[in-house]
Image (cartoon, grey):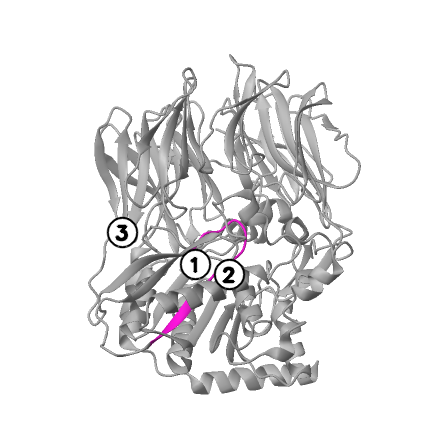
């Protein structure tokens, strides 16, 4: 351990001495990037459809403000900003990290069900605000803390979690009573466990029945799970947190679903008639009867149960030989006695109507995957599907009476909509490679007005660049798509280095006909400094077909890199001004893993790489993600070995910079330590930059500037 610590210190020291002074143009670019990112997010429509609430980062502050738009008056009003010092608990910080939400101020808010009021939390207090009058008041609850508030459908009660137990608060008086009494160390109620929030997109652990009589909640027991010590600060008296973490092949949290009668306080567990381990993926309602989606631990089988007097009946079962991707499509149609569903069972994600009597009706028959359901009425379903290529998409509407579909939005590029509950309005977010994002408020009768327009800032010294769509055909006939960012004006005869930006893993897409709000200006800066940037979606990426994504099953870090290298060779052949001998690669999270594998297993293909927050061995990552794609270490030992960067560490060639947050509770810093140890044993010499107190997202305005300058300087100096 002492040798490893000395190695870390020496590596950090050498790296710092090698860094060039920050380029003033880079500073101006980052200022513009961080200012331009202050766009609205977390859109929520009022039940009446008249108001749209959202969060917006405050200018020059790392806090979120709560705003509302009145659709009748077109007036925007800030309802709440930062009020005093942030008092977020560790549980709230962890959930924000799972949801990838940064900043303080307001984070969690919801509409009242029967009036134009909003419930939100700020500075440790629960507030309610009337959006019509602007009047707000504190709910005088003495319970501290009061976490993850969930309003009953009749708006009379707020369910909250405090110290792992659930309490019921009176909405007006703040008076409360305790509902559960089972919390203790590593045992809690009413909150999502790590796997649910990080990998299943289930961020909550409490659900009200529509009649407000019952509260359904999770009971989570993590006592048998592996533990990890995480440093949480950089003070002279450092604080460490013990995290229970579900490693691949290890012990998962035990999760049960209970029903509590809020009048009597009596709770009963809902049985799940499955052998073996499973995940509680979703909770819905058909009338007042609860419905659950249960996913087996190997994620090859999904069951939908409806409960009657705590007895389950199977409404639906789906099996896949590799894994099932969860969706958020469930919607019950009482008049049809059926629920809406999407599935990849045909090979492409399509829309189905599943009758309660077991009959299935396929509603879409296209040759393009459905990406998401956007809005539902009794007669229409609004949805998004890919466009002419996987780089584009379009908004469609399906008429349930005729079975016909028509295009609602088919503008060139990439679009997404947020639709009001009554489908009378939707907010259209649209952009293309050469046009920044515009948000347009659309009435379904055709009226439009601009809600938000992303600016293209003029930065002194930043030269124009081009975004060139690119595709090529792999040896097996698969067409792969990418984008090349290059200077608008090329120096005749000059050869330019090329930097590959990758994520490469499932459930993500980096190459689309959209304006890259996050990194577009940074890519333009690199272009100005003479570095072209290429991004491409390899097999294993999202928004194609089931077979396209499942091609990496049980063998990560192989086909993805072969596709990336083939794409790099193809784009360099197509554009002779690119210098194939000066290629770099970088990525974050799975992209960091891809970078480590590129520089070791596929050494010699890239001159330099930067891996941010990388997984380095899949034994170390969480069970829900890893086992979905790799199985367990016991089932697939050779796959785990070949997919580990540790296995290939001795082949490192070229310059590799690893960057990681020491307090990362998702991809633990231990991943970086293990790889560094392997490099020491094989006499290889990477560079290292660690971020004390930072988690997986490595947040903070100054921290991000520091990070991206290190990346910029590394490639400017080494390509």
Of circles 2 and 1, the one toward us is 2
Q: Determine if the magenta segment contains residue 502.
A: yes
Is residue 72 shown above or below 471? above
Secondary element at tag 2? helix
Q: Residue at x 70, y 80 (%)?
A: 1
Q: Is residue 43 above or below residue 236?
A: above
Disc 3: which residue: 436
- The residue positioned 53% from the left and 37% from the top of the image is 149
User: x, y percentage for residue 404?
Assistant: 39, 22
- Return the mark for residue 536: 1
**Against 454, is 319 above or below?**
above
Q: Residue at x 47, y 38 (%)?
A: 369
Q: Quadrant of residue 60?
A: bottom left
Depth check, front residue: 650 or 136: 650
Q: Of discs 3 and 1, which sits in the foreground?
A: 1
> Residue under circle 2?
563
Residue 170: image location, x then y, percent: 54, 29
Q: Earlier in the sequence, mark 2 or mark 1?
A: 1
Give the side of residue 143 with respect to residue 2, left or right: left
* Numbered range of the magenta stretch: 496-510
């Amino acid at each position: 351990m002492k040798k490893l610590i000395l190695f870390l210190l020496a590596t950090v020291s050498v790296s710092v001495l090698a860094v060039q002074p920050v380029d003033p143009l880079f500073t101006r670019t980052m200022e513009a990037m961080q200012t331009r990112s202050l766009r609205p997010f977390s859109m929520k429509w009022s039940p009446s459809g008249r108001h749209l609430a959202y969060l917006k980062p405050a200018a020059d502050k790392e806090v979120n403000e709560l705003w509302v738009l009145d659709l009748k008056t077109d007036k925007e009003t800030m309802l709440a900003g930062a009020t005093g010092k942030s008092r977020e608990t560790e549980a709230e910080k962890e959930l924000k990290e799972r949801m990838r939400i940064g900043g303080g101020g307001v984070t969690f808010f919801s509409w009242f069900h029967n009036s134009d009021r909003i419930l939100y939390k700020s500075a440790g207090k629960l507030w309610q605000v009337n959006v019509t009058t602007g009047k707000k008041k504190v709910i005088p609850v003495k319970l501290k803390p009061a976490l993850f508030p969930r309003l009953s459908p009749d708006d009379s009660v707020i369910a909250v979690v405090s110290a792992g137990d659930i309490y019921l608060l009176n909405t007006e008086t703040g008076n409360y009573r305790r509902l559960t009494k089972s919390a203790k160390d590593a045992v809690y109620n009413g909150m999502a466990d790590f796997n649910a929030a990080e990998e299943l997109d289930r961020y909550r652990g409490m659900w009200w029945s529509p009649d407000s009589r019952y509260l359904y909640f999770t009971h989570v027991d993590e006592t048998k799970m592996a533990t990890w010590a995480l440093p949480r600060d950089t003070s002279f008296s450092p604080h460490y947190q013990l995290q229970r973490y579900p490693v691949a092949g290890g012990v998962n949290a035990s999760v049960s679903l209970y029903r509590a009668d809020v009048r009597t306080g009596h709770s009963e567990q809902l049985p799940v008639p499955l052998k073996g381990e499973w995940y509680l993926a979703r909770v819905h309602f058909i009338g007042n009867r609860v419905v659950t989606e249960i996913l087996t631990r190997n994620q090859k089988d999904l069951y939908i149960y409806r409960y009657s007097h705590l007895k389950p009946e199977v409404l639906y079962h789906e099996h896949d030989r590799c894994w099932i991707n969860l969706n958020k499509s469930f919607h019950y149609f009482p008049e049809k006695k059926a629920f809406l569903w999407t599935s990849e069972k045909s090979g492409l994600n399509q829309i189905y109507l599943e009758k309660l009597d077991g009959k299935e009706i396929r509603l879409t028959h296209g040759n393009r995957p459905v990406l998401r359901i956007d809005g539902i009425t009794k007669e229409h379903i609004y949805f998004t599907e890919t466009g002419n290529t996987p780089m584009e998409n379009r908004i469609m509407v399906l008429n349930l009476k005729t079975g016909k579909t028509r295009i609602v939005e088919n503008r060139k590029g990439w679009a997404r909509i947020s639709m009001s509950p009554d489908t009378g309005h939707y907010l259209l977010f649209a952009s293309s490679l050469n046009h920044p994002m515009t948000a347009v408020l659309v009435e379904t009768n055709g009226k439009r007005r601009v809600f938000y327009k992303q600016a293209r800032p003029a930065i002194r010294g930043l030269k124009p660049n081009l975004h060139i769509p690119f595709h090529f055909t792999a040896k097996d006939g698969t067409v792969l798509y990418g984008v090349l960012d290059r200077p608008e004006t090329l120096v005749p005869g000059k050869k330019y280095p090329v930097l590959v930006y990758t994520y490469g893993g499932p459930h993500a897409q980096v190459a689309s006909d959209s304006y890259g709000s996050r990194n577009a200006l940074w890519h333009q800066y690199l272009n100005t400094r003479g570095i072209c940037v290429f991004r491409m979606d390899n097999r294993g990426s999202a928004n194609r077909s089931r077979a396209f994504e499942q091609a990496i099953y049980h063998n990560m870090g192989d086909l993805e890199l072969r596709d990336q290298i083939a794409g790099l060779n193809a784009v360099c052949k197509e554009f002779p001004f690119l210098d194939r001998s000066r290629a770099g690669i970088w990525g974050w999270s799975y992209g960091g893993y891809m970078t480590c594998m590129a520089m070791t297993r596929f050494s010699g293909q890239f001159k330099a790489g930067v891996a941010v927050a990388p997984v380095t061995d899949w034994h170390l990552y969480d069970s829900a993600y890893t086992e979905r794609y790799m199985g367990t270490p016991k089932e697939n030992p050779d796959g785990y070995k070949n997919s580990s960067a540790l296995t290939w560490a001795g082949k490192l060639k070229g310059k590799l910079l690893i960057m990681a947050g020491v307090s990362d509770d998702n991809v633990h810093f231990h991943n970086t330590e293990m790889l560094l140890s392997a490099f020491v044993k094989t006499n290889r010499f990477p560079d290292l930059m660690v971020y004390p107190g930072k988690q997986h997202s490595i947040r903070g305005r100054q921290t991000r500037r520091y990070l991206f300058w290190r990346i910029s300087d590394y490639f400017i100096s080494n390509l």
